[in-house]
Image (cartoon, rainbow, N blue to C red):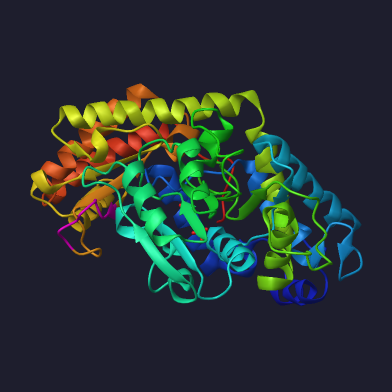
């Protein structure tokens, strides 16, 4: 076939079944390599997951072609009847699943969602409080170089040295600082949050309590972590972590039905839906990513099925098994264990830093990330710990039996971290194991 002619057609007509492989082999090969990396390794970064083929299909859909600034029924562009159906489905499913009256599904990702919440609730220079990044918080909760620590007066709280959040200490600091907004949520906290106590703490100074459930949204939906609904004023979450959707985010709250075309009469809890919607658009973003919204809708439908509850239960069981097995091999777990999907390991007794551990495990086919531990004596770029979690492996169908094998491989890799042959040996075993848990078996880019 004449390739030039085919290319000519592709430029002007989209009705030819062109693949990435035929139009862009270089990029196709890079995608194929990533597919193999995901397939053959043990993905243990707790903020990651594998979406279903249905979510992947929605994400690669024609929704990406459409502009739809505004909200369902109130758009600044024509031709949005179908997009309105898609976004309304995502909103309705989010509201039902979490039990709230309002859902904004447009934030491009978790960080923009938190930015929108700050924009909605605070004036520049007002005070917010969040968990320090090096104690498991997130950049957007007031870290100095982030927008949240620059445009607002940011005060950070920390955990106790053993890694547990101390609610009495926090209550005292909140009373002293009197923030307008209190962020609660974490990227490396292996324990359950006491939302009732946190809401008491926030109310003591009439601060907005913002629960950032990015890491644990899927566990909440699955019933294995308490929900902040009824306690937090606003809930933000990414959709791509334990919730197992596409990269994206949502903002959930209760209040008077949103009237995004009107300025609310006042900034108060009653008008949160309108304040949030207006902060996302036109405050911060332009056109929603409709392909992403469609994929979020699909993921929320999946999360409402009974099988998702079983998934969430297994995620926690796998993490607890891993915690027991690693503790038996003299690994020190921050807080002594886990209640959720992740483990934070203090490597100070293992004669290895977090960066070398990450590298050694990577060579062994086990993907984790280096992480600071509470009161870390080392620098954030080469901290004392590693963080690992079970959501992606559980999606592949792995259970306690596999966790026991993996704990031993992690142990061997850390002991023999400078022995390349030993690490390659583990990698072969990893590949053999992952081969028994197929990932996107039909998918190929080259
Ligand atoms: C992941 C995460 C975010 C940010 O999400 P991005 O999509 O990476 O911007 C915010 N807060 C918490 C607690 C997170 O875990």
Q: Is residue 57 left or right of residue 397?
A: right
Q: Residue at x 41, y 54 (%)?
A: 175
Q: Quadrant of the C terminus?
A: bottom right
In this view, 403 is above or below 243: above
In this view, 370 is above or below 142: above
Q: Position of residue 297 (x, y in %)?
A: 71, 45
Q: Residue at x 81, y 48 (%)?
A: 88
Q: Position of residue 14 (x, y in %)?
A: 80, 67
Q: Is residue 430 left or right of residue 70?
A: left
Q: Is residue 208 left or right of residue 37?
A: right
Q: Characterize the magenta stretch by its predominant secondary structure.
A: loop
Query: 366 or 177, which is in the foreground?
Result: 177
Q: Position of residue 226 (x, y in %)?
A: 51, 32
Q: Is residue 91 left or right of residue 73?
A: left
Q: Quadrant of the N terminus?
A: bottom right
Query: Which quadrant of the view contains residue 190?
Result: top left
| Residue 387 appearing in the image | yes
Query: Which quadrant of the view contains residue 327?
Result: top left
Q: Which residues are magenta?
A: 370-378
Query: Which quadrant of the view contains residue 399?
Result: top left
Q: Position of residue 159 (x, y in %)?
A: 29, 48
Q: Is residue 377 magenta?
A: yes
Q: Is residue 238 magenta?
A: no
| Residue 398 appearing in the image | no
């Amino acid at each position: 076939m004449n390739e030039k002619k085919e290319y000519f057609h592709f430029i002007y007509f989209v009705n030819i079944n062109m693949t990435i492989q035929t139009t862009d082999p270089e990029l196709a090969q890079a995608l194929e390599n990533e597919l193999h990396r995901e397939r053959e390794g043990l993905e243990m970064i707790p903020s990651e997951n594998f979406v279903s083929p249905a979510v992947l299909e929605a994400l690669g859909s024609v929704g990406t072609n459409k502009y739809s600034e505004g909200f369902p029924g109130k758009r600044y562009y024509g031709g949005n009847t179908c997009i309105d159906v898609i976004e309304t489905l995502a909103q309705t499913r989010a509201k039902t699943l979490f039990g709230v009256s309002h859902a904004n599904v447009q934030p491009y990702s978790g960080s923009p969602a938190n930015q929108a919440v700050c924009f909605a609730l605070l004036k520049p220079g007002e005070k917010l409080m969040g968990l320090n990044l090096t104690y498991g918080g997130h950049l957007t909760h007031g870290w100095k170089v982030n927008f949240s620590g620059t445009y607002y007066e940011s005060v950070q709280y920390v955990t106790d040295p053993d890694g547990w959040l101390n609610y009495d200490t926090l209550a005292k600091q909140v009373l002293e600082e009197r923030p307008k907004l209190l962020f609660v949520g974490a990227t490396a906290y292996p324990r359950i949050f006491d939302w009732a106590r946190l809401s008491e703490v926030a109310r003591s100074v009439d601060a907005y309590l913002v629960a950032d459930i990015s890491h644990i949204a899927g566990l909440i939906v699955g019933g294995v972590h308490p929900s902040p609904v009824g306690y937090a004023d606003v809930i933000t979450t990414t959709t791509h972590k334990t919730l197992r959707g596409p990269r994206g985010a949502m903002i959930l709250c209760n209040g008077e039905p949103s009237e995004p075309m009107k300025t609310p009469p006042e900034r108060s809890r009653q008008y949160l839906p309108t304040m949030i919607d207006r902060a996302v658009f036109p405050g911060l973003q332009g056109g929603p990513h409709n392909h992403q919204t469609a994929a979020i809708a699909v993921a929320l439908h999946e999360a409402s099925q009974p099988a998702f509850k079983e998934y969430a239960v297994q995620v926690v069981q796998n993490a607890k098994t891993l915690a027991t097995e690693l503790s038996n091999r003299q690994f020190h777990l921050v807080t002594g264990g886990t209640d959720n999907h992740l483990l934070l390991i203090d490597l100070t007794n293992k004669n290895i830093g977090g960066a070398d551990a990450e590298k050694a495990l990577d060579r062994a086919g086990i993907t984790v990330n280096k992480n600071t531990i509470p009161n870390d004596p080392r620098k954030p770029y080469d901290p004392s710990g590693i963080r690992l979690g079970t959501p992606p492996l559980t999606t592949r169908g792995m259970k306690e039996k596999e966790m026991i094998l993996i704990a031993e491989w992690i142990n061997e890799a850390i002991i023999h971290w400078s022995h390349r042959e030993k690490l390659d040996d583990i990698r072969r075993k990893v590949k053999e194991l992952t081969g028994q848990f197929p990932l996107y078996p039909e998918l190929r880019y080259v």
